[in-house]
Amino acid sequence: MESTLFERNSGLIEARVDDQLVMMDIDSGTYYGLDQVGIRVWECLENPIAIADLVKTLRREFDVSELQCVSEVSVYLRDLVSKGLIREVS
């Protein structure tokens, strides 16, 4: 899974509200909110990116071990995929 590429789905409207990013899925009308780390992950997903590259970026910016970062990013990306916010790129 570390070499799988992920990118954002395009059917979302997003806006910054204070220190959060609020998004709405146009098709379902569902709202989502991201915190500081979630926002950074979202920014990195603007273009297709592999988990390994995302982990490298996050580790440079946040104080987190590689094992913890890989584990948490993998779970987070699976959650975003299940909600239809991002997709795997072949």
Image (cartoon, helix red, strand yellow):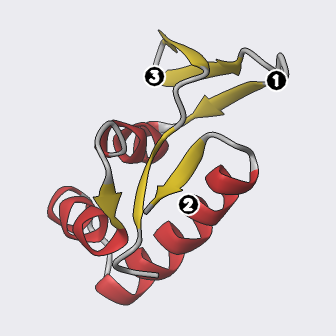
Please name the residue that numbered disc 1 is placed on.
Answer: 30
Between marks 2 and 1, how big is the CA–CA gap?
18 Å
* Dot 2 alpha-carbon crowd within 10 angstroms: few under 14, some 14 to 19, many 20 or more: some
Residue 81, by quadrant, is bottom right
At a point 20% along the width and 69% down the height, the residue shown is: 56
Please name the residue that numbered disc 3 is placed on.
Answer: 19
Please name the residue that numbered disc 2 is placed on.
Answer: 77
Q: Amino acid at mark 1?
A: Thr
Between marks 1 and 3, how big is the CA–CA gap?
20 Å
* Dot 3 alpha-carbon crowd within 10 angstroms: few under 14, some 14 to 19, many 20 or more: few
Query: Looking at the image, is mark 2 or mark 3 earlier in the sequence?
Result: 3
Q: Would you say 81 lies left or right of 56 here?
A: right
Residues at discs 1 and 3 in contact (Cβ within 8 Å): no
Residue 77, by quadrant, is bottom right
Q: Amino acid at mark 2?
A: Leu
At a point 35% along the width and 42% down the height, the residue shown is: 40
At a point 26% along the width and 67% down the height, the residue shown is: 63
Circle 3 sits in a helix, a strand or a loop, which is it? Answer: loop
Residue extending farthest to the left is 60
The residue mark sitting in front, 2 or 3, is: 2
Query: Looking at the image, is mark 2 or mark 1 earlier in the sequence?
Result: 1
Residue extending farthest to the front is 90
Query: Looking at the image, is mark 1 or mark 3 earlier in the sequence?
Result: 3
